[in-house]
Image (spheres, rainbow, N blue to C red):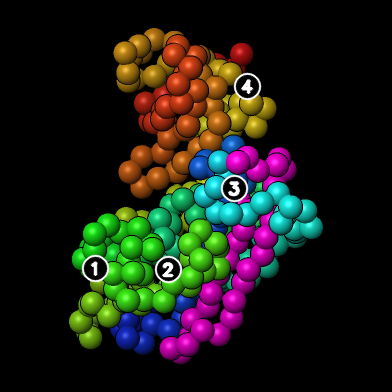
Amino acid sequence: MNFDPNVPLRQLSEQYSVVAFDTETSGAYAIESEVIELGAVKFQSGKVTEKFSVLLKPSRPLTADNIKIHGITNEMLTDASDMKNEILKFCDFIQGSVLIAHHAPFDLGFVAIDIESNQLQFPGTLNFCSSLLSRALLPATNHRLQTLIKEHDLIGGAAHRAFDDAYACLQVFLKCVEKLDDSATIAKLIEVQKKDLAWKNYEVLGLTDQKVKSLVKAMRSQSSINIVYQGGQTKNQVRPIKPYGIVRNPDGDYISAECGLDLQRKRFYLDKIKEVELL
């Protein structure tokens, strides 16, 4: 869908639906971990018009560390739906919207994997990050979602539950829009954000780069591989790693992996991985 960059922000919800969404996950990295809760709220013509909220069953039980973050237990997910039954519904819900998430690269990265895994097309949305926008427009002690809600007297909910965080994200986005003058347009909001959060930037499974394909294969089979990495103490030398998850990020795509040299979890940036050898 094409979005008119000249639409005034004061008329945004009259021209397009505005959807804020959030994910709760079984861990920090896509492929290694999965979405276990998906929540979204749709805002049109100045009011909330629809809600989306679903718990999702992971392929492996949650750990105590997972549960500590969001409070979602394995018992709560016993009768939860499978993502394959919900991802098309979610894509339909957000289609044609101005889409917002707090720390959007995280949420977009997880959902993109599920869209690709189910052979769906990426939705036609214009994507914004309320964290990036708030850093540019809202003074705060820090720019965590709950801090922004508290310090700007916004309506929040249960922290780290997907629908409540989505609603809080919407409040932060609307507050950011208020801070811009009446002449501000979608183009101005894109300028303020600076970073391109288009879905294509979060594609993983459809990439033709053989290096990425090999890394994904190793992640899914939980196998070790050898890489030549242009960084660290063993620069340009072969090192064994066990890759777990992948992050496509505006500041540089990377994988989370256990380094075979010291058995520590580290980030390895894709543009510094020059060779990959499956073992």
Mark 3, residue position: 67
Rendered residue at 61%/13% (across/down): 279
Going from N to C along the chain, the mark reached first, 1 or 4, is 1
Identify the amino acid type marked 1: Leu
Q: Main secondary structure of the magenta part?
A: strand
Q: Which residues are magenta?
A: 35-64
Which of discs 3 and 4 lies nearer the camera? The answer is 3
Rendered residue at 61%/51% (across/down): 35
Residue 252 marker: none
Going from N to C along the chain, the mark reached first, 3 or 4, is 3
Rendered residue at 46%/26% (across/down): 265
In the picture, measured across the screen, residue 235 lies left or right of residue 205, that is left
Secondary structure, mark 4, is loop
Q: State how far apart marks 1 and 4 are (Cα).
A: 44 Å
Mark 4, residue position: 223
Mark 1, residue position: 138
Secondary structure, mark 2, is helix
Rendered residue at 58%/27% (across/down): 214
Q: Is residue 100 or residue 258 the one in the foreground?
A: 258
Judge the density around disc 3: few (<14), some (14-19), many (≥20) Cα neighbours within 10 Å. some
Mark 3 and 2 residues: CB-CB less than 8 Å, in contact?
Answer: no
**Looking at the picture, how far across and down is residue 255, in whole percent?**
47, 33
Identify the amino acid type marked 3: Ile
Secondary structure, mark 3, is helix
Q: Is residue 182 or residue 256 the one in the foreground?
A: 256
Judge the density around disc 1: few (<14), some (14-19), many (≥20) Cα neighbours within 10 Å. some
Which of discs 3 and 2 lies nearer the camera? The answer is 3
**Looking at the picture, how far across and down is residue 196, in whole percent?**
36, 56
